[in-house]
Each structure stands twice: as C-alpha cells, then as structure tokens.
C-alpha cells in the first residue's frame, strides 16, 4: 500500500500552531514511509473562506517547508463530484430526502431537551413516501445511518474506540441549497485522492464515526485514522491567544526560525528518548505515529525560545546576517553599507550567544550598525555622568596611539588606563560600553571595540564627551 497523507485546513482564518503540527505529522509520516503528502484547501464554507486566509496558510506552510508534493486541491471546485456521490446514495436507497422545516427541527430539539436526550433527528422522513412531501420545499439529503450495533475504529493514536450506532443520527450530506456538507466532501475527497491515513486533531474523532458510514455505504475502503490530542496552554485549558498561540506568520514576524518551530512542534506530543534537538532528517527517520501520546500537550513559549536560540547558535553566520539584513530593511528600512555589513558579520559570533530570536539579534546588532551620535537607553544614560564622560574622554589619547588594533592590545591599554588612575576596571568598562553601544549589555567590550575599529570608536567617544 502506498502511503498518502493530507493536510486539509479550512481557510476561515490563519494557520495556527495546532494546524502546523498536524501538517508536520502528516508530512513526516508520509516521508518516513516513502509516501506522498498533499494539501487540500477545504473552502466549501464560502461565507467564511477568504483569499487572504488561503494565502496565509500556503505562505505559512511554504515557510515551514511543509508544502504539499503537488499543487493544492480546492474542495469547492469538486462540488459536482460530491453531488454525484449523493445521487448514487439516493439511487441505492442509502440516503433520502428530508423535507422538515426549520420549525419542525427546532421542535425535535426542544422535545429531546425536555426528555434529557441528545438532540438527534428523529428520522421521520427516512421511510416516508416522497410524493407526500409539502410543495415548494427544498429538501436536504440525509444518509441512512445504521440503527443497531456499533461502529468501531482502530485508531493509530487513540487505540480501539467504538460508539453505539443509536447515537449516530441520519446526518445531512446535501443542504437544501444543493451544496454538499463538510462531512460528505471530506470522505469523497479522501477516497478520490487515495488517502491511506487520515492524521488530524482528536476534535475530529466524533466525525470519524459518521464519515465511516459514508465509506461503508459507498463500499469504499476506509483509511486508517490517527487522531492526535490537541495542544493546551500551560494552565491545561484549550490553547488560545492568551497562552501565546498566534498565527504562524506572527511567529515568523517575532523572529523564530522555521526549523526551530518545527522542532518544537514535533516535541509537542511526540518524542524520541530525551532528545530535544531533532533535525528534519532525523525526524523523518525516527517518526512513528504510534509514538504520539494520548494526552494533550502544553504549549510553553520558554521551551520554544530555548530551542530557537539553540538553532541560532548553530546556524551559519552568513544565513544569520542575511536574516538580520532582511529584518532591518523590512522593519526599519535600513540597508547596510559594506563597512557596517563587515562589522555585523564579524560581531555575529558574540551576538548570537545572547539572543532568543532574530528580532533580538537584530536589535543587539545595532551596536555595529548605528552611526554616532548614538541613542542611549535609560540605564546607559544614567551611567554616563559628567565624571564618567570626562573619564572615558581620557581614553582617546591611548586608543589613538594604538598601532595594532587587536583585542589583546585593546585590553592591555584599557586595563593600564584603569591601573594608572587607581580605579577598578569596571569603572572604565561600564561607561565606555554605554558610550559605544548606547546600552549596558553587550558582548565582550574588547571584542566590540576591535570590531568597531579605531575611527568609529573615537567618533563615538567624542560624540558623548
């Protein structure tokens, strides 16, 4: 059997964390089984589906490198095929037209509530003669679900799950306006696309029992199901924006790396021993859907930060430099001349050890990019008292005399300067760092001075003194 998986989002909103993880698991399962992974846009809800949401989903998947192996399939474009299946079911007596009015349906629900029962449709049109239908009423089409027994699914994550068929209603497969329902469209598309494994959130588990009835009615093979637990917040409740759950584009804008985000999502519910950092190649080799846990995972932004910072430390400085340049141009309309770009590239090894994301890295990289006079943050401005400014002005002469502009010579010069004035080195280093960077936190001050170069250092000191 050829393994074919699919990710099938509805374009009624952005691509969120849960959807991205579902796409990742489908991708990895297909790759680990030498199969195919496809994308289907389930855009049958025409009122809520938007072009912007479709673009956001596709762009998000592209950024995560989780695009399908083929061009996306749009469910709405297959409506004629869906209606064809409905007509087949009607002809075979496995579905029927229901002429209940909205008022009648509400009466059925109200009666169920009074009797403390689930508000299931009472099947009143299941065996009625259609010739008795009221005039000028457009019927819905309902599937004839089994009345007895139970439906059992061997779920690859949840294990064996069953439901009594009496709990299933004759659900609608074609609306009164002639549009197919989600429940039907999903099954027809999965069958026609030869989907072998349906991997999705466990909020769809109840749908699986109903969709199973359509497979059975059409005498189609049923795919294997794997319903993965949802992601919760740290407080154990359903993940929402207040937990930090945002659209994938927001994580990109906040400076997270796609490979780090995928690594983090992989570890939400699946793991291999105690390994935290798992590359895409390793994940493909190791991934097993049966290893996904049954309990909800908890979203932890601090863990994401730790994984992202690890990927940044291990990333080539050439790529980091490109990401910073892109960030500066996009957000600040800043372009780097060759001198500033060289400083940035030389300083990245020290800068990347202190940042959790590209935004933080770009912000800290400004110490090599800005031109004097430099804006001071509050702490730096407080350190640069009148006496401190006078002190570091005294550094101009010994720094100007340096012929070998290296960390070693710079360190020796600064420490001799402090010794000669009988003061602690920190009394020199702190105001000097503030003057050169505008902050009180930076990489090693000797490294910063070496990378800035003599001319720039002198200009920055003179600008504050």
Image (cartoon, rainbow, N blue to C red):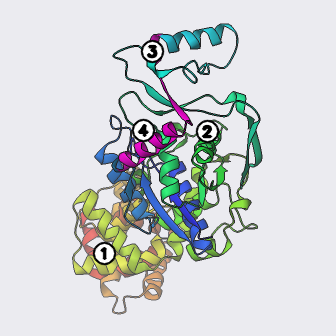
- In whole angstroms, how far apart are the C-alphas of marks 3 and 4? 18 Å
Q: Quadrant of the N terminus?
A: bottom right
Q: Which residues are magenta?
A: 78-103
- In whole angstroms, how far apart are the C-alphas of marks 4 and 2? 15 Å
Residue positioned 58% across, 23% down in the render: 127
Answer whether labels 2 and 3 touch (C-beta < 8 Å): no
Please report whichever mark, 4 or 2, sits nearer to the chain's N-terminal start.
Answer: 4
Report if residue 440 lies within the magenta region. no
Q: Which label was assigned to residue 210? A: 2
Residue toward you, 21 or 202: 202
Q: How many marks?
A: 4
Q: Which residue is mark 4?
A: 180
Please report whichever mark, 2 or 3, sits nearer to the chain's N-terminal start.
Answer: 3
Report if residue 85 lies within the magenta region. yes
- In whole angstroms, how far apart are the C-alphas of marks 1 and 2? 72 Å
Q: Which residue is mark 3?
A: 102
Image-quadrant location for residue 325: bottom left
- In whole angstroms, how far apart are the C-alphas of marks 1 and 4? 70 Å
């Amino acid at each position: 059997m050829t393994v074919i998986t699919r990710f099938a989002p509805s374009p009624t909103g952005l691509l969120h964390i849960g959807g991205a993880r579902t796409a990742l698991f489908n991708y990895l399962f297909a790759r680990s089984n030498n199969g195919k992974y496809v994308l289907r846009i389930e855009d049958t809800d025409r009122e809520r589906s938007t072009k912007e949401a479709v673009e956001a989903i596709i762009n998000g998947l592209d950024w995560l490198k989780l695009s399908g192996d083929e061009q996306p399939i749009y469910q709405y474009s297959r409506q004629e095929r869906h209606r064809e299946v409905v007509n087949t079911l009607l002809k075979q007596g496995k579905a029927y037209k229901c002429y209940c009015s909205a008022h009648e349906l509400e009466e059925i629900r109200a009666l169920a509530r009074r009797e403390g029962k689930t508000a299931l449709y009472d099947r009143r049109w299941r065996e009625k003669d259609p010739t008795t239908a009221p005039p000028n009423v457009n019927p819905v089409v309902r599937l004839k679900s089994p009345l007895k027994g139970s439906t059992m699914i061997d779920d690859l994550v949840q294990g064996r799950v069953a439901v009594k068929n009496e709990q299933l209603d004759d659900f609608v497969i074609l609306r009164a306006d002639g549009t197919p329902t989600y429940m039907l469209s999903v099954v027809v598309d999965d069958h026609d696309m030869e989907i072998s494994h349906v991997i999705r959130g466990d909020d769809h588990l109840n749908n699986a029992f109903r969709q199973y009835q359509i497979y059975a009615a059409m005498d189609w093979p049923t795919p294997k199901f794997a319903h993965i637990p949802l992601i919760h917040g740290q407080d154990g409740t359903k993940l929402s924006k207040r937990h930090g759950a945002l659209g994938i584009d927001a994580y990109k804008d906040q400076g997270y790396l796609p490979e780090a985000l995928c690594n983090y999502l992989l570890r939400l519910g699946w793991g291999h021993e105690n390994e935290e950092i798992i590359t895409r190649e390793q994940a493909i080799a190791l991934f097993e859907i049966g290893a996904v846990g049954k309990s909800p995972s908890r979203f932890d932004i601090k863990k994401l930060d730790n994984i992202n910072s690890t990927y940044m430390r291990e990333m080539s400085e050439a790529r980091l430099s490109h990401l910073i340049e892109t960030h500066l141009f996009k957000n600040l309309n800043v372009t780097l001349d060759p001198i500033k770009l060289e400083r940035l590239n030389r300083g990245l090894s020290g800068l990347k050890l202190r940042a959790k994301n590209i935004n933080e890295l770009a912000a800290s990289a400004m110490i090599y990019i800005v031109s004097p006079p430099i804006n001071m943050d509050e702490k730096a401005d407080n350190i640069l008292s009148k006496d401190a400014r006078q002190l570091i002005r005294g550094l101009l002469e010994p720094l100007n005399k340096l012929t070998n502009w290296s960390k070693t010579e710079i360190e020796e010069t600064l420490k001799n300067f402090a010794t000669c004035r009988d003061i602690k080195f920190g009394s020199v280093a702190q105001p000097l760092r503030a003057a050169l960077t505008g902050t009180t936190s930076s990489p090693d001050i000797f490294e910063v001075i070496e990378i800035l170069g003599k001319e720039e250092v002198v200009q920055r000191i003179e600008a504050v003194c």
